[in-house]
Structure formats: C-alpha cells, structure tokens
Amino acid sequence: MLSAQNISKNFITDNKVVPVLKNVSVDIHDGEFVSIVGRSGSGKTTLLNVLSTLVRPDGGELHYGTENLSALSEKRLNRLRQSDFSVIFQFHHLLPYLTVLENTLLPFMQSVRPVKKAAMEKALGCLERVGLADKADRLPGNLSGGEQQRVAIARALVKSSKVLFADEPTGSLDKGTGEKIMGLLSELNNDGLAVVMVTHDPVYAKMAGRSVHIEDGVIV
Amino acid sequence: MNILTIPMRNIRRKPSKTLLLLLVFSLGVMSIVALYEVSQVVGHSLEKKLTAFGANIIISPVSEKLSVSYGGLHMGDMLFDVHDLPEEETVAAIRSIALNDRLSAVAPNLVTMTRVNDTAVALVGVRWKDERGIKSYWAPKGTFPEKPDEVLVGSKAATKLQLKAGDRLSLLGRDFTVSGTLYDTGSDDDTVIFMNLSSLQELQGKPGATSFIEVAALCAGCPIEDIVAQLQEKLPGVEVKALQHVINQRMASIHFVQNLALTISVVILVTAAAMVGLSMMSAVSERKKDIGILRSLGYGKPQVFIIFCLEAGLIGMLSGVVGYLGGFGASFQVLEFLHMAEGGTPIFSSTHLLMAAGLFSLVTVLAAVYPAWKGAGVEPSAALVAL
Ligand SMILES: Nc1ncnc2c1ncn2[C@@H]1O[C@H](COP(=O)(O)OP(=O)(O)OP(=O)(O)O)[C@@H](O)[C@H]1O
Ligand SMILES: [Mg+2]
C-alpha cells in the first residue's frame, strides 16, 4: 500500500552535507503493524516523517497505492494528510486553545462550512473509544500527556485514516499509560488500521507484526 | 464549528493580549472617528463664520462697458444698457434654486451717487438684516439704523463730511439722521453712506429696483460652480459671478482643517495597523508548531493564510465598532471642550458604523497579510520540532 524506494535524505549541518537516510526501501502493507527500531540518531524519525509526507526526501520514490507521492501536487498531498494519513507526535499534537472535541474535529474545520452533525457524533464516539468522552469539552492544557496522545489517536479514528504514524508514542509516558496506548494501537490495528511506529522499547517493538531495523541511515 | 472557530478561540485564549491590542486599535479608531466628526462640524461652522466676511457671489445686470477717449482726453468708462434688477422676483428666483440650503445670505443693493455739501458720495440702499448677515464684521460708533430715515456712514465718508452719530443731513432732498458711523473696514464700505433700501428706491422713483445682489454661499458640501450654474439657470440674462479669490481663500481654510484631520488620521491608522501587523508577526512565530499541526492535518497554505487574516480582521472589526461608538461619543466632548457645541452636532449613522467596521477590518487584514503569508509558508515538519 505504501512503498518507499531508495529514499535518501541529507541534512546540512555546519556547512556539511550529512546523509541521514541512504537508499532506504520499505513497504507497508494494508493493515500492517510495523515498528521502526534502531539506535538514537540512526534516522528513525526522519524515515517516519518521509513516509508520512511531512518531510520531503532528497531522492527516491514514495508510492501510495498507485500514486507517486513524490510527484503529487500540494493540494492532493493536503487531501491525503486530511484523510488517509494520521500522525501522532511525541509532544505536540493539539492546539491549546481548542477543546478536546474541537481538536478531534480539526481535520473537518478547513472551510466556513460548519462541521456536520454526523462527524461530531462520530468524534464523540471515537473519544468514547479512547476513554475521553467525559473530557470532550476540556482544553488540552489540563489533560495528562497520555490523554493528549489519546486525543490525537481519536482524531485519526474520526478521519477514518488508513495509516497511523507514531513517533515514540510512549516515550514521554509512564509504564502504565504507555501500555494503555499500546493496547489501544493494537486494538485499532486489529480493526484494520495500518500502524507505523518508531520505538526504543523492545517489548513494544515485538507487539508489532514486523520490525524494521535501521542503522546509520541504512536498513539492516 | 468551522474555520472561524480557530481564530476566534485563539483570540479568547490570551484575553489580556487581545484586550490590549483591541484597546490600542479601538483608541486609534476612536481618535479618527472623533477627528472626522469634529472636523466636519468645525469645517462647517468655520465656513459659516467666514461667510460673515462678505459675499462670494455677485448677481448683477448684464452691461456693456466702453472705455471712451476722444481727442487725447480720457472720458472714463461708460456703461451702456444698465438695467436694474427687480428685487422681489430676483430674490425669489435665487431662493428657489435646488441648493437653496447652501445660501446663507442674500442681500439686495441699490447704488446711486449724490452730493452732500458739494462732496460727491455714493449712497447704497440695503436691507439691514440681510446686509448685516453678510457683513457681521461691521461695528458702528452709535447704533445701526432702525428707522427708515436713519443712515449709517462709512468711516472715510464720515471724516470727509464731518459726520457723527446724531447728526442730521440732507440726501436727495430728504432729511436723514446719522444713527452711527462705521469703524474702518478697509473695504469700499468706508467711503459710502448706507440707507434703507426702500427709502432709496422711493427717493429714486424706482420702487423694487436693485443694482446688484450679493449672495453668501456655503461651498464646503458642493462646488461653487454648481450653485452659480443653478442661479444662472433661474436668472437668464443676468450676470452671476463667483468671487473666486474669496471662495478660494475660504475653502483653503476649511480644507486646511480637513486635511489636517486627514493627515493625523492616516498617521494614527498606520501606527495602529503597524501594531496589529507586529503582533501578528510575533503570533506567527509563536505558533509555528500550531501551524505545523494544521498542515499535517491537511490544511493548505491558503487556509493557514486565511486563519491569520481572519484573526486580524476580527480584531479590526471589533475595534471598528467599539472605536466608532467611542469616537462618536468623544466628538461631543471635544466640541464642548472647543466651545463649538452649538456649531452643530455629529449625526449618528449606522451606515457609518458598518463602514467603520468594514474599513478597519480591511486595514487590519492588510496589516496581517505579510505575517499571514509568512505563516502559510511554514512547513508541516514544524510540528515535529521538540519543545
Ligand atoms: N532538521 C535537521 N537538521 C539537521 N540534522 C538533522 C535534522 N533532523 C535530524 N537530523 C540529524 O539526522 C540524524 C538522524 O535523526 P533522527 O531524528 O532521524 O534520528 P532518530 O533515529 O529518530 O533518533 P532518536 O532515537 O534520538 O529520536 C541525527 O544525527 C540528527 O542529528
Ligand atoms: Mg527520533
């Protein structure tokens, strides 16, 4: 479904070109749960961001279904981000001045057309599913880190995303909360959502169907 | 819940910052509105006051002038075909023009020459009320005439004829009393004797006749050419002449007041807009991550641009409404302070209110264009930057 071929990405630090991804090729299949593991600085986050279209690669090709994402218009890319792809960031995923419900519905608030009632009901259902129905009207500022992450997951659900990208979703959480998030992710994966997750934790990595090892920008 | 929710919520998030911005911009709008209202009233009353310094349109019969010299001897200018204007009809015609409300005074005059103790002097018949409406700078030693057999003597004429208030003199065979003499005016008025128009018409055997009619028109609201054209239309075969130098001087003073107000307004507006622009600029760099989140959720550059513009526009609209109401109220205080409250009152208009709201939201949106464009350029990866 999502296929990356010969992806390369360089960063420029101190006027030197540093290759971070070197001819990386990965395939993510429908409904798959893939974990990306490797040492710190090996290029995991960079790979995940290239896959989720947030960072443009310097070389190689990215295909989603039959579409070549590297050649896609900005508009079509936006549509993909709006519907098929969801990203859970490690720290920052919510607009602090919107309520939990509004944050969940953010993908549907792009025009002056009001959010449909059906979408609103669906959002409440998804918040229910991540266990936050009673906090729908709260502002993110008084939610815990794990709760904020769950709001981002609920948002991915409302969108009916096909792929969920998560960069160390449990990284900033305590053990118990981390396990809850992982439980939620595998549950959603069982329902057909493909999950691509960067993690340091070998236990969580094993929960994924497949692990991709990356070392110094090369898959091993 | 739609795209408007985002800027509205953000405005509410930092109430103190929003309030401060709102306050500054509202104060700006308020000063502009108050300046505008006051300058309207001041300009208007200034013009009314200036009108008191003489007529700016002269209506006279058409005549043909001929300079005659014969045998090397200059025989002066001769006027042919001098007809008098019928007072009642002409005044009625003048008063019937569409721009009648712009005419502040209409003063008929009849002029003739006579001799007093072998000294030639001009006699001018006037309607006291109308004439004084045009020449409010007149100040008499003594009093203004009230009875038909009283006259007012110009300063130079008084010196020459050795006349003072209370003196009696004979004019065209009738006895008159000098009710007062004028202080120097520096104008033609100094050399003549003024009397009641009806009395002069009677003595001349020309009932209802006038030589010319002076008109004082207010031209702040409309060009003098329109008034002249309308008068000409009502008075075919009569000469209607605008005293351009008088009008230009007057309009220059009024335009000065209005231009001053305009200049100050522009300065205030630019300053306030710069404040909004600066605040939007810092808002954009403060919220790079927010923009990254929106972009990662599929918001395009136009949407991000619109969100920031809307945010600024909302502030502009609110300030426009608050500032207009405040400025309107303040203009009364200012007029009172300037002792001009009786010069006219600003008139509330909901159209102006809407225009102010529209105009100032436009200004703030324009001020936000550059920051918003900057914001739209933020890439989705901005959301990835760790705290
Ligand atoms: N925007 C950037 N500019 C310059 N260098 C960067 C940038 N992002 C990442 N790098 C460099 O690229 C390399 C890989 O970074 P990346 O974030 O992908 O590593 P990672 O495997 O996710 O590490 P970690 O486990 O610590 O999160 C690192 O050496 C990092 O310093
Ligand atoms: Mg990383």
Image (cartoon, coloured by chain):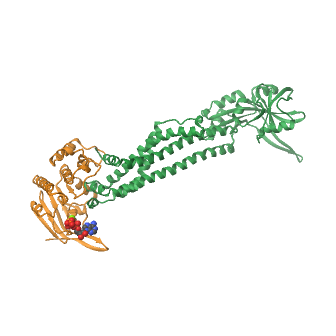
Rendered location of residue A208, percent (x, y)? 10, 60
Position of the N terminus of chain B by quadrant: top left
Please tell me in which quarter of the rendered image ligand 2 is found: bottom left
Taking depth in this image into account, of B57 and B275 the one nearest to the observer is B275
Quarter of the picture containing the C terminus of chain B is bottom left
Give chain A's shade: orange
Whole-percent x, y for residue A92 in the image: 25, 56
Task: Examine the rendering and report whether any part of residue A60 can be seen.
Answer: no
- Report the number of discs: 0
Is B282 left, or right, of B177 in this rendering?
left
Left/right of residue A4 with respect to residue B56 in the rendered view: left
Where's residue A7, x and y in %?
20, 68
- Position above or below: B21 against B328: below
- As drawn, the chain in green is B
Q: Is residue A177 visible?
A: yes
Residue A64, quarter of picture: bottom left
Quarter occupied by residue B257: top right
Q: Is A175 positioned to the left or the right of A93 in the image?
A: left
Question: Which of these two is toward me, B22 or B200?
Answer: B22
Above or below — where is B160 with respect to A201? Answer: above
Q: Position of residue B222 (x, y in %)?
A: 59, 40
Is B12 situated left or right of B168 in this image? left
Against B228, residue B308 (above or below) is below
